[in-house]
Image (spheres, rainbow, N blue to C red):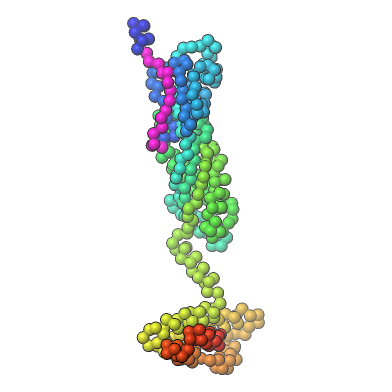
Amino acid sequence: MALMDFIKKQFIDVIHWTESDDGTLAYRYPMQDFEIQYGAQLTVRDSQMAVFVNEGKVADVFAPGLYKLTTQTLPVLTNLQNWDKLFESPFKSEVYFFSTRLQLDRKWGTPNPITIRDKEFGMVRMRAFGIYSYKVADPGKFYKEVSGTREEYRVDDLDGQLRNLVVATMSDLFGESGVPFIDMAANQVEFGRAMQEKLLPVFARYGLELDAFAVQNVSLPEELQKVLDTRIGMNIIGDMGRYTQYQTANAIPLAAQNEGGLAGIGAGVGAGLAVGQTMAQSMTQALQPGAAPAAAAAPAAAPAAAAAISADEVVATLEKLHALVGKGILTQAEFDAKKAELLGKLS
């Protein structure tokens, strides 16, 4: 009976793992009650590493290659089992394979806006997202810290943890750097590099190596983005007087093509110019040291305003000149030169 049990007993003489395309990071070789034959062959492929675990403790770690399992190739396990040099019997040990391939196109992002302190805008809520890639670099540490004794451990099982670590690290980076949001948004490559440097030790703690980290977008919530757009627009406008002249110069050629011509919009343009000039003058006077109140300065400014050419006169003159261009009496270049001269008198 003992002989029959021995014959029925199964031994393992070849150990290997062919990876499937399901994102498996760790795979426990199916042993059940099997024993590994002394002198069995272990095959570890280029994109893998293998770990022998004895009674819950990591023993020997194998890099890619072909191995014959003996006391010489299993020094740690031999020591743990107190085997002598003549040991040639089957033995038991858990064997785990780990994929060391790069896990590409892993996505990260802020599920909710994170609040940061910004130099330019004060407290703001921002969003960001991008991609990163990593691989298992230390299978022994990954086994102890992450995968454990599970039959399989996949990329999807780890994604949530890594995403949360990325978002937490990003919040710390913003707080420590003090770089304004606008500068971060305009230099996403540099932002990504800074994030990668800060995340390297975080990934290493789990036996992982962060290969690349990219920031694809940094943005503000919609309501804050509108405020930013308004501020950018005001910076572009700058001098209110020049802005008004610019609008008028662009409107005249378009108005000449519409029904009623320039005469139809003369009053509107004149009103716009008057408002623009008044605002520009008020802002200039307010910024000058020792400026007199607006009410007192108004009578003195009245004669100068009266002496200046009126907007209605400029519009009427330009309308007549434009008609001459249509009849071929004036060239377009001559019209443009006269237009610039007349508009200059309005400033």
Q: Which quarter shows the N terminus?
A: top left
Whether residue 184 is in magenta: the answer is no
Q: Is the magenta stretch mostly helix, strand or loop?
A: loop
At 51% from the left and 11% from the top, the residue drawn is 87
The magenta-colored residue range is 9-23
Total label count?
A: 0
Q: Is residue 160 visible?
A: yes
At 52% from the left and 41% from the top, the residue drawn is 210
**Quadrant in the rendering for residue 325:** bottom left
At 38% from the left and 15% from the top, the residue drawn is 10
At 59% from the left and 55% from the top, the residue drawn is 178
As drawn, 40 above or below 165 = above
Residue 191 picture location, percent across and down = 55, 52
Q: Is residue 145 visible?
A: no
- Left or right of residue 282, residue 133 in this image: left
- Left or right of residue 8, residue 115 in this image: right
Judging depth in this view, the residue of 83 and 302 nearest the camera is 83
Q: Which quarter shows the C terminus?
A: bottom right
Judging depth in this view, the residue of 160 and 44 nearest the camera is 44
Judging depth in this view, the residue of 184 and 212 nearest the camera is 212
Residue 63 picture location, percent across and down = 51, 28
As drawn, 156 above or below 92 = below
Residue 53 picture location, percent across and down = 48, 24
In this view, which residue lies farthest toward the right?
A: 290
Residue 296 picture location, percent across and down = 59, 89
Judging depth in this view, the residue of 289 and 46 nearest the camera is 46
Whether residue 19 is in magenta: the answer is yes
